[in-house]
Image (cartoon, rainbow, N blue to C red):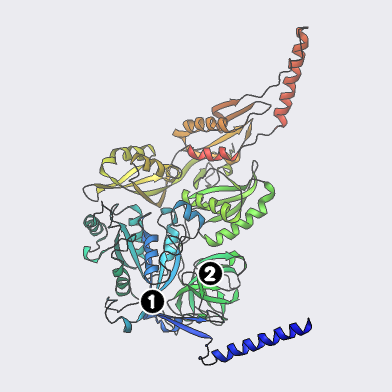
Amino acid sequence: MGSLCRASKTLKSQKYLSLLHTYSNFPPFSSTFTLNDSRLGVAHDFCSNSRQNSIDLAQYTPERIRNFSIIAHVDHGKSTLADRLLELTGTIKRGHGQPQYLDKLQVERERGITVKAQTATMFHKCNHNGSNIKDADNAPTYLLNLIDTPGHVDFSYEVSRSLAACQGALLVVDAVQGVQAQTVANFYLAFESNLAIIPVINKIDQPTADPERVKAQLKSMFDLEPSDCLLTSAKTGLGLEQVLPSVIDRIPPPSGSASSPLRMLLLDSYYDEYKGVICHVAIVDGVLRKGDKISSAATGHTYEVADVGIMHPELTPTGVLLTGQVGYIVSGMRSTKEARVGDTLHHSRFSVESLPGFKPAKHMVFSGLYPVDGSDFDALNHAIERLTCNDASVSVTKESSSALGLGFRCGFLGLLHMDVFHQRLEQEHGAHVISTVPTVPYIFEYSDGSKVQVQNPAMLTSNPNKRVTASWEPTVIATIIIPSEYVGPVITLCSERRGQQLEYSFVDSQRAFMKYRLPLREIVVDFYNELKSITSGYASFDYEDSDYQESDLVKLDIVLNGQSVDAMATIVHKLKAQRIGRELVEKLKKFIDRQMFEITIQAAIGAKVIARETISAMRKNVLAKCYGGDVTRKKKLLEKQKEGKKRMKRIGSVDIPQEAFHELLRVS
């Protein structure tokens, strides 16, 4: 048997020697081979060791870099246009991956909206005169940083942060819908940032598209020349070949200095379980290399850069980032509080002047978040910390409620922002929360002259020694664009919500433009849904914060069996208090389960009860065992049951389900 094994090994070795001899005539493989793609204008090196040197950023001087974002109203085709541009430059393969490639969050996929601004780096070969066909082999390659932004008004903070890293913007307008409210808001955000604006009229393949009407709207509202508009269809690819040459010709390169000390702006961050905090940065001046020691201007902490690269469109290490480029860094930050959006990062050995950063987010809606199980407070705290790293526009403070225990008071930019935050907490971090009725910040003045800002209605105590003498509520300037035939119902809706008309004009023969001053309390829950309903979905709505106005406000308490539920307290206008109180108690009666004792639900302003409902007790038939006999025996059993129910009512607690809190949101 041993001789057979030795013979087998000898034969195998002779076979391998003959194969080696056969292939020795071929030239040896190098450890790196290059794929030249003339369509991309960039040489891809595939290295057996790593991909770190696969993209050489040193050849892209600031003159050959363009940073631009795509801004538009909701559902005007931003993400689809971003997909086509990524395919046109070969960054992603056509038909591979999911549609709306840059919308990566589960909540974005489910709702069909963009929530987070996403960055992608593309390479495109083009002559500077705008022709990308003639003499293509000798044309220079440009590095293009594309940022796809959200379109909803609640995420305008994401848009403003994205524009800080750009020198230009593509203003996308639907050829069917035309200019809408968020189009106006985003245009002025870009205009105030001194960006070059390229108007793109999208969806021209639609049967009802009217590009000429949209050109006239852009001219009348923004003074954009019709000849500057690009006509495209992101869905079919029609007209897309003119977009990138226009970006290269009409958007200026970044203005930083490569010889100056390093300064970079922290645009965004998110937490990775393995790498820690990953920061998205824009290099304003200087050069950043892997291994550099950098410091934060805000916290003074020092870090070593462990990884640096670009989003192409996934994280691609390059080892270096040069002036004007946008990329990511991994610096070993372990706490999400260290990555402050808008912070200036610089080399530790130099002291530099900080960049302007961003205006702080102005929170419009406040809501309490509590764990369903009180023992999950630490897990919820951990989840909120991780999520606020990725969403810097949320404010978080700890609070406690006598009904719900320990929790958090969170400030949001709007109701959709709040809803998306809750959904991300559940989907990405597995947290189960109870959210209280959203409120807005009010100002109250007391009889002793002191003023206090109230974000949580439970903090407004009823003290007989300190009487409220005046109150103010925040207002917004609302922009509404609607088809002309819906003007009457919209004016009625705004009047019911205590609105004051500021402007009323016509965009063209079919569309009206209206501006109203509205109390923020009136629009924060269901105004947008009502507006969409009465206009058959054709209205577009946007708002910006305005001043406080004096108003007659009262605190409405919900009382269960004589105990005030602070989590359900709300502040309302005095004229609407009785109607809202009646609706609240009727809703609660449907959702609170019957108990073995009677439950009284009351809505009260101070000591005055303005609405009441009663949930009757479940009752055992204690007379079932009595077959005839003296009536005093039956009375004795009934009295005993009555005393027991009184005792239960004294010590029993009423469980309020989460559905009851959701129903309170529906009461305007």
Instruction: Label 2, secondary structure: give it.
Output: strand
**Residue 314 vs residue 147, the one in the foreground:** 314
Q: Amino acid at mark 1?
A: Leu
Quickly name the residue at label 1: 40
For this view, does 504 lie left or right of residue 294? left
Q: Local crowd at mark 2 within 10 Å, few (<14), some, or many (≥20)?
A: many
Residue at 36 percent of width and 46 percent of height: 517
* Mark in the foreground, 1 or 2: 1
| Image x and y of residue 483, in percent | 28, 45
Res. 146 image quadrant: bottom left
| Image x and y of residue 343, in percent | 51, 69
| Image x and y of residue 313, in percent | 46, 69
Mark 1–mark 2 Cα distance, whole angstroms, equals: 27 Å
Residue at 43 percent of width and 72 percent of height: 121
Q: Which mark is residue 131?
A: none
Q: Amino acid at mark 2?
A: Cys
The answer to whether 302 is drawn above or below residue 588 in the figure is below
Instruction: Label 1, secondary structure: give it.
Output: loop
Res. 612 image quadrant: top right
Quickly name the residue at label 2: 279
Q: Are marks 1 and 2 in contact (CB under 8 Å)?
A: no
**Residue 362 vs residue 108, the one in the foreground:** 108
